[in-house]
Image: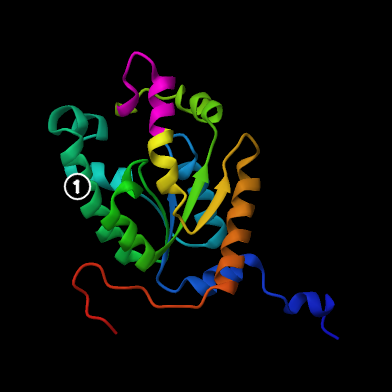
């Protein structure tokens, strides 16, 4: 009998996820402050795949910060550039991809994510979000007289669409490692139950 008995023959959740992803991305969606970047980095590290922050890639492509894009070019132009960058990034899986709070609201972006990734909504309550975003002053949509009311309105507008994601994990005030473990366990269950399919080309690549 091999050391450890039959338990050694049971694949870990990480092995199930990395084996089942193929070229797909793990795409984290949700509100600002839900932990997409901080948790996403830990998920990527645990799975041994790259982590990509879409907002950072947008800033790199534009040569300016997101706050500056909003103030000089407006939200509509930002959203257009965001969609283009995400389409490019989705060709680069497997990876963990953190998206901006409004990215998943674009129907074309949701279609591309569904074809080339697995979407996970990090669902957080208002008080959790407010506690986190108070630490930063670079949230263009919250530069209002009442940030809490603005955030509440955004949640009402966005949460029904976020709920279309493949998986939902509660983001709350617990150690990040606990949420990372829940994400990976949910992905393993999803990949075990779902039929496998190849990613769909999004930028002119020939279909296999």
How many discs appear?
1
Which residue: 38% across, 64% down?
114
Residue 202 vs residue 168: left or right?
Answer: left
User: Which region of the structure is painted magenta?
Assistant: 141-154
- Give yes or no for residue 50 being in the magenta stretch: no
Give the labeled residue for mark 1: 81
The quarter of the displayed image where residue 67 is located: top left
Closer-to-camera residue (69/162): 162
Which residue: 31% across, 20% down?
143
Relative to 83, does residue 145 appear above or below in the rendering? above
Residue 128 position in % (x across, y down): 55, 29
Residue 179 position in % (x across, y down): 61, 47
The local secondary structure at tag 1 comes to helix
Query: Taken as a whole, is the magenta stretch helix, strand or loop?
Result: helix
The quarter of the displayed image where residue 109 is located: bottom left
Which residue: 47% across, 62% down?
49
Query: For the C terminus, which image quadrant?
Result: bottom left
Categorize mark 1 by other alpha carbons within 10 Å: few (<14), some (14-19), many (20+): some
Q: Is residue 15 visible?
A: yes
């Amino acid at each position: 009998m091999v050391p450890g008995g039959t338990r050694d023959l049971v694949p870990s959740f990480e092995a199930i996820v990395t084996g089942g992803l193929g070229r797909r991305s793990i795409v984290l969606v949700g509100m600002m402050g839900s932990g997409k970047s901080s948790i996403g980095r830990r998920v990527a590290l645990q799975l041994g795949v790259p982590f990509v922050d879409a907002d950072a890639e947008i800033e790199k492509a534009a040569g300016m910060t997101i706050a500056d894009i909003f103030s000089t070019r407006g939200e509509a132009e930002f959203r257009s550039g965001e969609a283009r960058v995400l389409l490019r990034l989705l060709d680069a899986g497997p990876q963990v991809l953190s998206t901006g709070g409004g990215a998943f609201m674009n129907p074309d972006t949701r279609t591309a994510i569904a074809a080339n990734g697995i979407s996970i909504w990090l669902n957080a309550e208002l008080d959790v979000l407010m506690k986190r975003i108070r630490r930063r002053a670079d949230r263009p949509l919250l530069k209002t007289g009442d940030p809490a009311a603005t955030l509440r309105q955004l949640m009402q507008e966005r949460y029904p669409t976020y709920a279309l994601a493949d998986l939902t994990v509660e983001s709350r005030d617990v150690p990040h490692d606990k949420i990372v473990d829940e994400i990976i366990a949910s992905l393993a269950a999803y990949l075990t139950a779902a039929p496998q399919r190849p990613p769909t080309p999004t930028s002119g690549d020939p279909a296999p």
